[in-house]
Image (spheres, coloured by chain):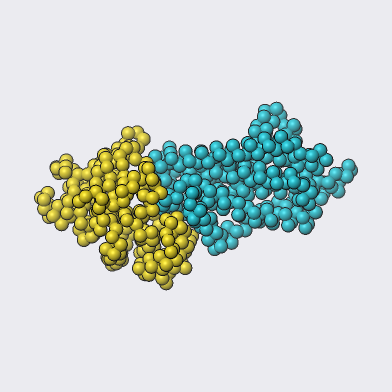
Chain colours: A cyan, B yellow
């Protein structure tokens, strides 16, 4: 793998952002709005709760982690979609870049851009609503890692979907986090769900993260085997996502889609 | 000409799309160093399909492509490091400046001493005064020059030009042809050039290949080929290839 070619993909994204406020603002504006909205909701819930519960570390913490996961996924897909929107596939894939280098470039771009969103969320949640991120302890590291890896996996799969089905299919990938959230138990234990939804939830890496988060707040601690299962699942999904992207690319090169990627998929 | 002097060797190249559509039918040809070869034919003859396979963005059904002696199917990276292209339908991302585009593509092609190289091609294609302008706001002629600057950025051994002057007025087209020829002479590059402008082809190409229905129908010197087949001009010969290919002998 050539680090220079990977850097070229990242540099292109940096150039685009440097010259466009419309690209920079969405990196943090929506997550900031979410923090403010959920910050006030948790304040209200704290005020009306007779049990003296603190909703900040459970609800606001969950929103923060979920928004970060969403930013990671969208960081991959938006970097990929820039090539779709600028009809750049022919220029790009006629260079010596390999699919591994390209996907790595998408991932590095996503990690850098999503970090900006995370910092903004942390500042808002800590300064204005008293969320102590460090209160989660060392478990925060596996929490973030699992969400990052799974977010990258969904981003790579979403990009593969657009590559396979054509530019109009980008609307399939925007709602993916909203579709996953009910199964992943972001705001409630997955035991709340019907049995079939619990089965789906157990196959989603974020589920043990949010179970763990609630466990810490409730003083039960984190189930390390559950976190290990979540991490293993996330890694497996990322590997599978990269393989799927490679297979979709090879199909696209076989049917001529790379060279003429401005209309819909030829099938 | 010995194969070691070829920058491009295409052997039995074959491409079938779904529904058994034969786009390219077992064609073989070569391009030598310092040679400009015209790839001609009517729309749908298989020119762009052939170029896409040489660029590695379309997988052949069978056959082989060697660029500067390197089989693209076995060693895509090294083969494509020696290649570049410009096509009227493949403009560079319009949301980046010329300088930014050249830097990104220079890194993708692994160009050494990149800044120096960018300065050279920007100067050569008269883009210095535009280098911080976004390519999307440039005129057709300027965008063509930017595509050519990108195409020469990595000092390719093989250059593929797919209708490089198609969107230009005659004066701008003449200017672009002169720049390409001047640079090609210096850089010892082999060029595969497609065009529907037979005047242009006769002016720049040393040899032409006529494609029809995915096969090479004729091959030869564009200045003598018409008379060899009973035509006065290359344009007349082109029209015969397009309308009555069966009246012409296969090579």
Q: Is residue A213 visible?
A: yes
Q: Is residue B174 left or right of residue B230?
A: right
Vertical arrangement, residue A122 with respect to residue A66, above or below: below
Residue found farthest to the bottom? B129
Residue B28 locus on image (x, y percent): 24, 43
Q: Is residue B224 left or right of residue A9?
A: left
Q: How many marks?
A: 0
User: What residue is shown at x 67% (from left), y 32% (from top)?
Assistant: A202
User: What residue is shown at x 43% (from left), y 69% (from top)?
Assistant: B130
User: What residue is shown at x 55% (from left), y 37% (from top)?
Assistant: A240
Vertical arrangement, residue B177 with respect to residue A9, above or below: below
Residue A221: quadrant of the picture: top right
Residue B234 locus on image (x, y percent): 17, 54
Q: Nearer the viewer, residue A134 or B179?
A: A134
Residue A41 locus on image (x, y percent): 78, 49
Q: Is residue B142 left or right of residue A100?
A: left
Q: Which of the image's four quarters has the C terminus of chain A?
A: top left
Residue B3 locus on image (x, y percent): 24, 48
Q: Nearer the viewer, residue B11 or A69?
A: B11
User: What residue is shown at x 34% (from left), y 57% (from top)?
Assistant: B156
Residue B163: quadrant of the picture: bottom left
Q: Nearer the viewer, residue A174 or B130?
A: B130
Vertical arrangement, residue A231 with respect to residue B236, above or below: above
Q: Is residue B88 visible?
A: no
Vertical arrangement, residue A154 with respect to residue A10, above or below: above
Residue found farthest to the top? A195
């Amino acid at each position: 793998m050539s680090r220079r070619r990977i850097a070229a993909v990242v540099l292109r994204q940096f150039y685009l952002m440097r010259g466009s406020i419309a690209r920079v603002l969405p990196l943090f504006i929506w997550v900031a709005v979410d923090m403010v909205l959920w910050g006030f909701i948790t304040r209200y819930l704290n005020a009306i709760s007779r049990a003296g519960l603190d909703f900040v570390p459970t609800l606001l913490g969950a929103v923060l982690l979920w928004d970060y996961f969403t930013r990671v996924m969208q960081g991959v897909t938006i970097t990929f979609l820039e090539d779709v929107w600028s009809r750049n596939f022919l220029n790009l894939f006629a260079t010596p870049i390999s699919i591994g280098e390209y996907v790595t470039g998408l991932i590095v771009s996503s990690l850098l851009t999503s970090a900006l969103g995370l910092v903004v969320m942390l500042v808002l949640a800590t300064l204005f609503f008293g969320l102590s991120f460090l209160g989660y302890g060392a478990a925060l590291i596996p929490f973030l890692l699992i969400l990052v890896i799974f977010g990258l996996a969904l981003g790579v799969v979403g990009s593969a979907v657009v590559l396979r089905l054509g530019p109009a299919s980008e609307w399939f990938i925007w709602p993916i986090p909203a579709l996953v959230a009910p199964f992943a138990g972001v705001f409630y234990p997955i035991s709340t769900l019907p049995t079939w939804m619990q089965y789906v939830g157990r196959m989603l890496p974020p589920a043990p993260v949010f179970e763990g988060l609630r466990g810490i707040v409730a003083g039960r601690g984190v189930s390390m085997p559950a976190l290990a299962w979540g991490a293993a699942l996330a890694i497996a999904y990322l590997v599978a996502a990269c393989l799927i992207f490679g297979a979709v690319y090879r199909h696209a090169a076989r049917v001529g889609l790379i060279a003429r990627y401005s209309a819909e998929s030829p099938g | 000409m010995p194969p070691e002097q070829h920058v491009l060797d295409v052997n039995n190249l074959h491409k079938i799309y779904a529904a058994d559509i034969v786009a390219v039918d077992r064609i073989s040809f070569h391009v030598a160093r310092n040679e400009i070869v015209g790839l001609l034919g009517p729309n749908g003859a298989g020119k762009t399909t052939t170029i896409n396979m040489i660029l590695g963005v379309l997988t052949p059904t069978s056959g082989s492509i060697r660029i500067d002696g390197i089989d693209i199917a076995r060693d895509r990276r090294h083969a494509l490091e020696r290649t570049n292209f410009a096509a009227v339908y493949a403009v560079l991302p319009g949301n980046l400046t010329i300088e930014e585009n050249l830097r990104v593509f220079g890194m993708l092609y692994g160009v050494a001493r990149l800044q120096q190289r960018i300065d050279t091609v920007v100067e050569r294609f008269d883009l210095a005064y535009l280098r911080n302008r976004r390519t999307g706001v440039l005129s057709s002629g300027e965008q063509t020059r930017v595509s050519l600057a990108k195409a020469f950025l990595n000092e390719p051994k093989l250059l593929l030009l797919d209708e490089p002057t198609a969107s230009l007025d005659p004066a701008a087209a003449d200017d672009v042809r002169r720049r390409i020829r001047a640079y090609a002479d210096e850089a010892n590059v082999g060029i595969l050039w497609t065009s529907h402008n037979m005047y242009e082809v006769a002016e720049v190409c040393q040899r032409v290949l006529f494609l029809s229905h995915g096969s090479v129908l004729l091959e030869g010197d564009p200045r003598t080929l018409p008379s060899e087949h009973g035509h006065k001009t290359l344009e007349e010969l082109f029209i015969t290839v397009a309308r009555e290919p069966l009246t012409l002998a296969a090579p």
